[in-house]
Amino acid sequence: MINFLKGLTLTLTTSLRKPVTAQYPAKDKRLQIEERYMGFPALTWDFQVGEPYCTGCMVCVRNCPTLCMTAEMKDNDFYESGRSNRRKIIDTFEINLGRCILCGICVDVCNFDAIEMSREHELSKYERNANRVNLPTLLEMGKFYQEESNWVPKQPEKNNGTPQSSKKPPEVINRVRRVPIDFIPKKGP
């Protein structure tokens, strides 16, 4: 009987305290997402030039362990007109988010800071193949992430798409080939 009363008091005390669960669908009752949270991958946008950072080099596609990405590149029209330093640019890019394991390898291997792990996580669909995200959607996710997190490139000097107006011609270095004394043929006997 004593154990019954102990259990009953425990039940009554827990029923009177504030709930610890979040009511997920209600937007005002959701839990806040941490800064370090890694959601789905997104492509970043170069606002200075008006084009994506991605050049379509496909390093991320080759290093993806689940092979959930596909990409194609094209010649950059801005480069031909002198508005950008990027000769090639991404033409099509697709990620199958149903296969993506959110590992972040694509972000680590990207040389151009073109792909980042956004904080987006609510992209569920009813069809299996509906989780494919194309280039415009990835760029919109990236723009939203850049604004939300005040994102700046990790390598701005490398990724700068704006052409430099005063480029110096490369210096010509005269190099003299030095030969060890042992290999110089001796003249005479």
Image (cartoon, helix red, strand yellow):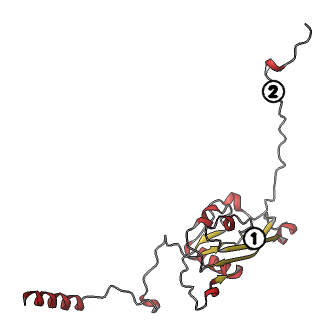
List the residue tagged with mark 2: 178
Total number of numbered discs in the rendering? 2
Mark 1 / mark 2, whichever is N-terminal: 1
List the residue tagged with mark 1: 49
Q: Up-down: is 24 above or below 168? A: below
Residue 99, located in which quarter of the rendered image?
A: bottom right
Q: Up-down: is 14 above or below 113? A: below
**Amino acid on which the number 1 mark rests in the picture:** Val
**Amino acid on which the number 2 mark rests in the picture:** Arg
Q: Horizontal placement of 165 versus 27: left or right?
A: right
Quadrant into which the N terminus falls = bottom left
Residue at position x 11%, y 90% in the image: 5
**Element at badge 1?**
loop
Counting other residues with Cα less than 10 Å from the Cα at mark 1, is it few (<14), some (14-19), or many (20 or more)? Answer: some
Between the C-alphas of marks 1 and 2, the distance is 47 Å
Q: Up-down: is 11 above or below 66? A: below
- Could you tell me residue 35's position as x and y percent? 48, 72
Residue at position x 76%, y 64% in the image: 162
Residue at position x 49%, y 70% in the image: 36
The residue at the far right in this view is: 188
Residue 79: image tag: none
Q: Up-down: is 24 above or below 88? A: below
